[in-house]
Amino acid sequence: MSKPAPLSGFPEWLPRQRIVEQHVLDVLREVFELHGFASVETRAVEPLDQLLRKGETDKEVYVLRRLQASEDTTDDLTAGSLGLHFDLTVPLARYVLEHAGHLDFPFRRYQIQRAWRGERPQEGRYREFTQADVDVIGRDELSFHHEVEVAQVMAEVFARLPLPPVRMQVSSRRLIEGYYRGIGVGADGTDDDIAEVMRAVDKLDKLGPDSVRRLLVDECGLTPDQARACLALTEVTADGDDLAKKVAGLGVSHPLLDEGVDELCRVLQGTAALRSEEFSVVAELRIARGLDYYTGTVYETRMAGFEHLGSICSGGRYDALASDGRSTYPGVGISLGVTRALAPLLARGLLTASRSTPACVLVALPDEASRASVDVVAGELRRRGIATETSPAAAKYGKQIRYAERRGIPFVWFPQVDGGHQVRDIRSGEQVDAHPAAWVPPADDLHPTVSRGAP
């Protein structure tokens, strides 16, 4: 068999890289659970008509079907009516509707799972990837304070991860919609004009302000003064109480605008104590991504030095996640693109693990006849939570030590002929008497550690 070629868009990690990813996932699980979120895992497939409701094209959804398809169109795997989920929000909506009778509301859920998207692979965009979502779902109503809470949860996650500095940008659908109504957009009472303006403003990074201004006038029907006012709002950036002053300085008034400003200020205040050199939160009113879907606060997060990836962590408030005709289920959530954030860092060696194995100790093998007794020593260490390997062969001790060095195992255990034991720190060369029922490694050596490498 010839050497297989890698599949573009389907990243695989080497053991040392996988330890980094596992560390990130462990931090996510721990923080989410400390905040009382329950873990769920949904099936990998959903009906195509459900997957396409968010406006995704069929080019982005992988269809699941049997290789040997028959004419039996009642079989979902034959008819091609199932697809792999491309995010975790569509499955969540279905999950809530299907299990609403067994859930307590507000339903606090986190989900860490693979997703698949059929787009052109590039750095930051993959065909198979891991996402970590946290959401609070209400029945018919959901208090605003949860919009502050999910930002606080992700702030705590970022504070514990060895990522480059991250900047969370927050905005508000209510604020932007209220501002547009205040300058006369949507005066006929419909939301179509406002949605069209939002879509045009969303192209600001791609087209630039002059082109967007022309779009607003030529295609959205705004006056030149209204177009200038829309672009003036996109220039507002604030990280505290100055948000209200800056928005007021634009000279626009509307009750919905006031509500949005107040809510966004509460988000900034609620995350103020969590900010550091590694994590910042700022209101940036140029953010329009997803505003046709979200209804309140929206979040985007960018990583310093990797802004070209776009947002690695996004989400927001949505007042109609799902409805069964009797109840509506509003929610607020935020999603970290684990693979999107980690893959570029791992590729550049900017995140690394201290070793490529969980093992802290290698028990040396004097000879093959001693393997049973060596296994007893290893078992005793493992029972006390110390990850332990036994040497694969009874080679010379120097060769066994080099085996441990290659794998990054810090300690080698040597059974003695008199029945005693010694353990060597192979980094310092220090070797001391020890007993498998009592010896404890330094806390920093018990598990692999993850650190940020030099750029």
Image (cartoon, rainbow, N blue to C red):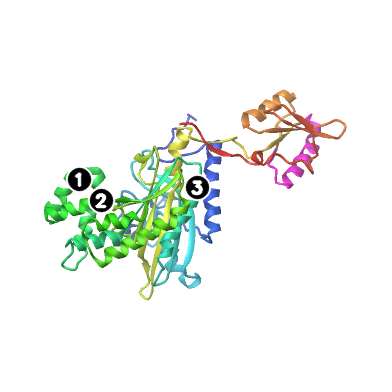
- Residue 342 in view, yes or no: yes
* 419 and 248: which is toward the camera: 248
In the rendered image, residue 379 lying in the magenta stretch gets the answer: yes
What's under tag 2, amino acid-wise?
Thr
- Give the residue displayed 16% in from the left and 49% down from the top: 213
In the drawing, does residue 101 fall left or right of residue 431? left
**Residue located beneath label 2 in the image:** 234
The kind of secondary structure element at disc 3 is helix
Q: Which residues are magenta?
A: 365-388
Find residue 11 and report its image quarter.
top left
Distance between the alpha carbons at the discs numbered 2 and 1: 10 Å
Question: Which numbered disc, 2 or 3, marks the residue that appears first in the sequence?
Answer: 3
**Residue located beneath label 1 in the image:** 209
- Give the residue displayed 33% in from the left and 49% down from the top: 60
- Give the residue displayed 19% in from the left and 68% down from the top: 189
Disc number at residue 159? 3
